[in-house]
């Protein structure tokens, strides 16, 4: 654990928080708090799931982490805070990043006076691994 990697992040750097930060660093799997807890709790058996949730919530408030609403059953987190979009499998709920800019034309009447400053687009479908394997979950509510 290298404390210097996370100096200036805006939180007190306990060994547990550093382990959570290390788990998130470069993670493109969009893990849930439970995923992170299971990964880190082996090192820190006395750490609670609440510690993970509190740390993730603090990081989200500090703008260091995004919360994805792709799974109704659990919150998912994205350490990549640069603008990007997502592909979401309706079967297994895998999430993949899309690093392409989209500028969908929105008629002035539909903008209702808004000045558009950004967007986040979610594409739903069936991933290569699930294609043809299981029935599709058609509920896309998050």
Image: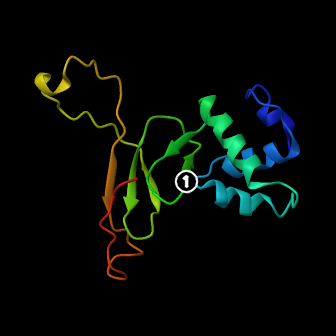
**21 left or right of 92 in image:** right
Q: Residue furthest bottom?
A: 133
Q: Is residue 86 above or below residue 60?
A: below
What SS does tag 1 mark? loop
| Camera-side residue of 73 and 11 | 73
Question: Residue shown at 34%/33% (left/top)?
Answer: 119
Identity of the residue drawn at 19% across and 21% down: 112
Q: Nearer the viewer, residue 137 or 24?
A: 137
Query: Callout 1: few (<14), some (14-19), or many (20+) C-alpha neighbours within 10 Å?
Result: many
Q: Is residue 141 above or below residue 103?
A: below
Horizontally, residue 94 falls left or right of residue 42, namely left
State how the image is colored.
rainbow
Where is residue 111 shown, x and y percent of the image?
19, 24
Does 5 sit above or below residue 109?
below
Along the viewing direction, whichever of 109 and 50 lies nearer the viewer:
50
Of 42 and 6, nearer the camera is 42
Which residue is at a point 32% across and 58% down the rendered structure image?
A: 124
Where 2 sits versus 106, above or below? below
Q: Tell whether 54 sits left or right of 12.
A: left
> To which quarter of the image does residue 48 belong?
bottom right
Whole-percent x and y of residue 117?
Answer: 35, 22
Measuring from the top left, give residue 114's x and y in whole percent: 26, 19
From the image, tell me which residue sits under label 1: 30
Badge count: 1
Across and down, in percent, residue 83 comes to 44, 35
Q: Quadrant of residue 139?
A: bottom left
Name the residue located 76 percent from the left edge and 25 percent from the top edge.
8
């Amino acid at each position: 654990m290298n404390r210097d990697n996370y100096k200036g992040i805006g939180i007190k750097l306990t060994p547990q928080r550093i382990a959570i930060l290390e788990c998130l660093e470069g993670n493109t799997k969009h893990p849930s708090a439970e995923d992170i807890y299971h990964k880190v709790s082996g090192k820190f058996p006395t750490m609670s799931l609440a510690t993970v949730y509190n740390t993730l919530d603090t990081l989200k408030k500090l703008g260091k982490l995004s919360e994805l609403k792709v799974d109704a059953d659990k919150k998912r987190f994205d350490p990549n805070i640069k603008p990007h979009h997502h592909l979401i499998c309706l079967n297994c709920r895998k999430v993949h990043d899309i690093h392409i800019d989209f500028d969908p034309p929105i008629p002035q009447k539909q903008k209702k006076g808004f000045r558009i400053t950004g967007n986040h687009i979610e594409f739903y479908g069936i991933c290569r691994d699930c294609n043809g394997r299981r029935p599709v979950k058609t509920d896309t509510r998050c």
